[in-house]
Amino acid sequence: MRNRPIPGSAGRVRPLRLLGDPVLHAPCGPVTDFGPQLARLVDDLFATMYRASGVGLAANQIGVPLQVFVYDCPDDEDVRHLGHVVNPRLVEADGVTVRGPEGCLSLPGLEAGTERFDHAVVEGVTVDGVPVRIAGTGFFGRCLQHECDHLEGLVYADRLTGLRRARLLRAARRASWS
């Protein structure tokens, strides 16, 4: 059995972009260069995600407007899901709609009840261009939808309405990082 490095162990931690940064609010472009820079980006995403104690991280959250995200996220049965997706497409989001607490590394320390489907399927490729199809339910399904939203220029606050949205945005304005 070949020893594989721990994801992110060769990466460098990059600064996180925070709510209000224009890169978080614009759709990301597709990856067209599958060279060593892409592999470094994925390593950096893992390193940054782990440092910030996250379960997922999209490339635009570190200022790179490309369609890439990484994840290390449990599902509701505590099964660990670990990987990355390049040029992901959310091809299924269905099942019951669940409102659950959702946070984001680009809104540190804040969370709000956010509606998401209980099941999601994402298709894309790996850094090597190999097709992947990832299905998730529960918390992991929420993570897949959340990261795909980032690549479309959305943060979870954009999914909130009414009082819930107003409270989150007020808290964000008052946050020490704002």
Image (tube, helix red, strand yellow):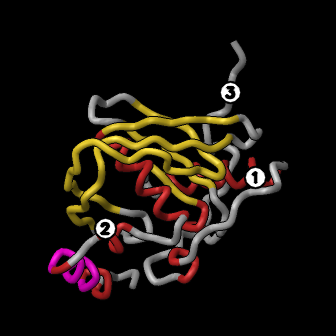
Residue 53: percent from left, percent from top:
42, 52
- Secondary structure that dominates the magenta span: helix
Alpha carbon separation for disc pair 3 and 2: 33 Å
Alpha carbon separation for disc pair 1 and 2: 29 Å
Report whether 20 appears left or right of 78.
right
**Crowding at mark 2 (Cα within 10 Å: few <14, some 14-19, many 20+):** few
What amino acid is at disc 2?
Gly
Callout 3: helix, strand or loop? loop
Report whether 39 appears left or right of 19.
right
Callout 1: helix, strand or loop? helix
* Image quarter of the C terminus: bottom left
The label on residue 109 is: 2
Against 89, residue 106 (above or below) is below
**Crowding at mark 1 (Cα within 10 Å: few <14, some 14-19, many 20+):** some
The label on residue 4 is: 3
Of callouts 1 and 3, which one flags the residue occurring earlier in the amino acid sequence? Answer: 3
Q: Nearer the viewer, mark 1 or mark 3?
A: 1
Against 69, residue 152 (above or below) is below
Residue 83: percent from left, percent from top:
56, 38
Magenta residues, start to end:
163-170
Report whether 163 appears left or right of 38.
left
